[in-house]
Image (cartoon, coloured by chain):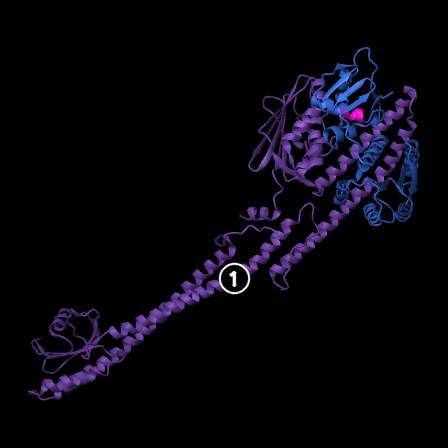
Chain colours: A blue, B purple
């Protein structure tokens, strides 16, 4: 996967570069709009990360210009601004995504994956998910662990489904809030954790291998190995 | 382009101003006319009196000098008839007979001697005797059988007989009547004309004011770039528009400054926060022993709290300055609360708290979804952090007077007495609180930015109550201005 990273803050660019390469992307980096334009037109990129506050031009203008130049790859917009302006919403509706700074790396990677998935020809939607001995029947909304039916509420099922779809990858609290409850909030209480504890109580029974792991300061991961 | 609420004409100020101006004008012109009418009527009477006095003297002279023979009556009669043809203001009568003048001579004993005029002389004589006219000065006389009074002058002859000359006031009254009629028509025309002129000029003037008011009220939280329309003229209204526009320039510039400050502050703080967080996360490699990971993890958590604090502080600062940028969409408050409760319920029951929603069903409001989410999360976080175990939180949602009313009550210890008077201010928190004191200030800021209101108090039966009202729809500011104008 070829990724173009347009970010003028050297510190941020450096750690993003490293972690993106660790995550398996081939990354090229640009520090301003002009360099980004040149790179984007020449190279075939699968996905772009564009910071809104570039030194020579506005990130949105750059994206619009690239679109005119025929660059079709989806864009993850990074914004340090306080409010999301209408043009970002427009791009969001057009299939792009945005992330406000500061962000968790896990969330950045998850959003990149989502963008790529959205833009690739969709495989037939699975009706079953399986992670180790955990099985989810998406049609009947039923989950079983080692063949034992789990008594889950609707919300717990949605949460577990989200974890299963991201099995083996870290999901943050704000990702869970966004994807499962549909809200971008930052509660200063442990609301998400309690949901996870409850779910864990039902999924990881006595004597079973614990599947849901907590990564403190980062989020949660559903083990797939 | 935009739907303007059409005001009933009769309720506009232009209508009232025109009515009063027209009333004053109409009264004034009537008074002038009354004065003129009296002047004209007096003048006409003076003329006919002069004629009467002159003629009656001439007739008296003729009657005295003419020998008292068989021809006397005829001579006097003809002279009288001739005189009758020279009547001032005379109208050509439909009948040939001259009914506007009569001549009457009485004998010394008061009997009717000579009568020249229409009809019989007896009623006239009766009327004269009833009035007992003695003076030379002409007086009014009502004769039976005539609708209009006569003006009668008299003279006493040497032989003790009297001569009376009567002139009908019919012509005089007719002149005045036609004068009145013409005046009335002219007056009506003038009054209507004046009303029209006043109404249209004031309406035109006031429509400028209304357009200014509409434009000014349309310039709200989100749009400060618009300006009120100015007219090319150099009158008070255009002065008002120019002053408003200058004021808006200043407001826009300070608002812009505020946004620039908060944006660059946010940017300047967030960029290093991003870099620090990223580096911390990267150093948190898999398989690291817990005791090494612990300080890094807690640093990340501190960083996230700092970010949250930064966001809330800036939001509250902007909202206090009425500069919070809203992205309004239609959302169902009932559904939103149910999802929120679903999210918070496990944490609450974990702490031994109960939460219950009493709602009258779907309730759509037009609001910024993200801000409303955060506002309600703040309220719930507040309850979660401060209520002791065993308490219950109740939420009541209903539509009331065009607004959504959300009342949050608990049966906990309530607000500290010392902070309860300024709960919605920044950095105000209870002694036991470990928050940063922005929660309720943020709630207040969001609700205000949406044109709602929030109040908090301690319930009499114990516990705290927070009441939030949010307008159901973002009122069209134009129609809102018109509403408030009434």
Front-most of B483 and B345? Answer: B345
Look at 70% across and 24% down and name the residue there: B344
- Classify the position of the N terminus of chain A by image quarter: top right
Q: Is residue B238 above or below residue B436?
A: below
Q: Picture coordinates of residue B70 (x, y %)?
A: 6, 87
Q: Is residue B382 left or right of residue B73?
A: right
Q: Picture coordinates of residue B356 (x, y %)?
A: 63, 23
Q: Picture coordinates of residue B303 (x, y %)?
A: 84, 30
Magenta run includes residue A87: no
Look at 73% across and 47% down and name the residue there: B255
Q: Quadrant of residue B65?
A: bottom left
Would residue B164 be visible to someone looking at this image?
no
Question: What range of the chain is rendered magenta?
Answer: A161-165
Magenta run includes residue A162: yes
Q: Is residue B32 above or below residue A198?
A: below
Is label 1 in a helix, a strand or a loop? Answer: helix
Q: Is residue B444 left or right of residue A188?
A: left
Q: Picture coordinates of residue B14 (x, y %)?
A: 51, 57
Label tally: 1
Q: Quadrant of residue B374?
A: top right
Q: Is residue A33 left or right of residue B358?
A: right
Q: Main secondary structure of the magenta part?
A: helix
Q: Quadrant of residue B421?
A: top right
Circle 1 sits on which residue? B200
């Amino acid at each position: 996967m070829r990724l173009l990273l347009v970010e003028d803050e050297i510190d941020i660019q450096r750690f993003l570069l490293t972690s993106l390469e660790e995550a398996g992307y081939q990354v090229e980096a640009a520090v301003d709009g002009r360099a980004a334009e040149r790179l984007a037109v020449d190279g075939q990129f699968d996905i772009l990360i564009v910071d809104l506050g570039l030194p020579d031009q506005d990130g949105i203008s750059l994206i619009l210009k690239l679109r005119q130049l025929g660059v079709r790859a989806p864009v993850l917009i990074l914004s340090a601004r306080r409010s999301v302006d209408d043009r970002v919403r427009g791009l969001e509706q057009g299939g792009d995504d945005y992330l406000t700074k500061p962000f968790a790396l896990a969330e950045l990677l998850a959003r990149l994956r989502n963008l790529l998935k959205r833009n690739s020809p969709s495989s037939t939607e699975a009706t079953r998910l399986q992670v180790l001995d955990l099985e989810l029947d998406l049609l009947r909304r039923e989950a079983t662990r080692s063949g034992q039916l789990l008594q889950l509420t609707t919300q717990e099922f949605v949460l577990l489904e989200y974890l299963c779809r991201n099995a083996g990858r870290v999901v943050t609290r704000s990702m869970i809030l966004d994807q499962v409850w549909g809200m971008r909030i930052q509660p200063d209480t442990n609301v998400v954790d309690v949901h996870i504890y409850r779910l864990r109580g039902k999924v990881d029974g006595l004597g079973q291998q614990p599947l849901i792991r907590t990564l403190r300061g980062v989020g949660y991961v559903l083990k797939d190995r | 382009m935009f739907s303007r609420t059409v005001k009933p004409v009769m309720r506009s100020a232009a209508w009232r101003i025109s009515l009063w101006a027209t009333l004053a004008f109409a009264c004034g012109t009537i008074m002038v006319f009354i004065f003129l009418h009296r002047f004209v009527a007096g003048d006409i009477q003076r003329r006919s009196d002069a004629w009467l006095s002159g003629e009656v003297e001439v007739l008296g002279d003729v009657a005295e000098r003419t020998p008292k023979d068989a021809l006397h009556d005829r001579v006097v009669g003809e002279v009288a008839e001739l005189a009758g043809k020279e009547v001032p203001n005379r109208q050509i009568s439909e009948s040939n007979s001259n009914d506007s003048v009569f001549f009457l001579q009485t004998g010394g004993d008061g009997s009717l001697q000579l009568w020249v005029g229409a009809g019989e002389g007896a009623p006239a004589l009766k009327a004269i005797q009833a009035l007992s006219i003695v003076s030379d000065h002409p007086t009014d006389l009502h004769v039976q059988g005539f609708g209009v009074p006569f003006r009668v002058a008299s003279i006493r002859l040497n032989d003790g007989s009297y001569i009376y000359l009567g002139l009908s006031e019919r012509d005089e009254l007719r002149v005045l009547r036609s004068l009145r009629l013409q005046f009335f028509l002219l007056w009506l025309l003038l009054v209507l004309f004046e009303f029209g002129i006043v109404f249209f000029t004031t309406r035109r003037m006031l429509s400028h004011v209304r357009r200014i008011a509409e434009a000014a009220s349309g310039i709200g939280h989100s749009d400060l770039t618009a300006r009120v329309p100015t007219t090319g003229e150099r009158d008070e209204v255009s002065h008002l528009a120019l002053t408003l526009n200058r004021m808006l320039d200043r407001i826009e510039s300070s608002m812009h400054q505020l946004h620039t400050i908060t944006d660059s502050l946010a940017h300047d703080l967030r960029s290093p926060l991003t870099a620090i967080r990223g580096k911390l996360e990267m150093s948190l490699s898999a398989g690291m022993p817990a005791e090494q990971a612990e300080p890094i993890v807690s640093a990340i958590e501190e960083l996230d709290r700092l970010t949250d604090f930064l966001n809330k502080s800036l939001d509250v600062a902007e909202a206090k300055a009425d500069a919070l940028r809203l992205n309004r969409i239609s959302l169902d408050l009932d559904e939103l609360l149910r999802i929120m409760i679903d999210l918070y319920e496990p944490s609450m029951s974990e702490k031994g708290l109960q939460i219950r929603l009493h709602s009258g069903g779907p309730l759509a409001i037009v609001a910024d979804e993200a801000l409303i989410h955060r506002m309600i999360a703040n309220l719930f976080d507040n309850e979660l952090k401060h209520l002791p175990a065993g308490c219950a939180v109740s939420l009541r949602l209903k539509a009331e007077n065009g607004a959504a009313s959300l009342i949050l009550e608990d049966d906990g210890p309530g607000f500290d007495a010392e902070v309860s008077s300024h709960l919605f201010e920044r950095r105000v928190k209870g002694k036991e609180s470990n928050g940063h004191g922005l929660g309720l200030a943020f709630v207040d800021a969001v609700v205000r930015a949406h044109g709602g209101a929030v109040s908090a108090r301690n319930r009499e039966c114990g516990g705290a109550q927070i009441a939030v009202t949010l307008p159901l729809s973002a009122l069209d500011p134009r129609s809102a201005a018109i509403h408030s104008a009434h």
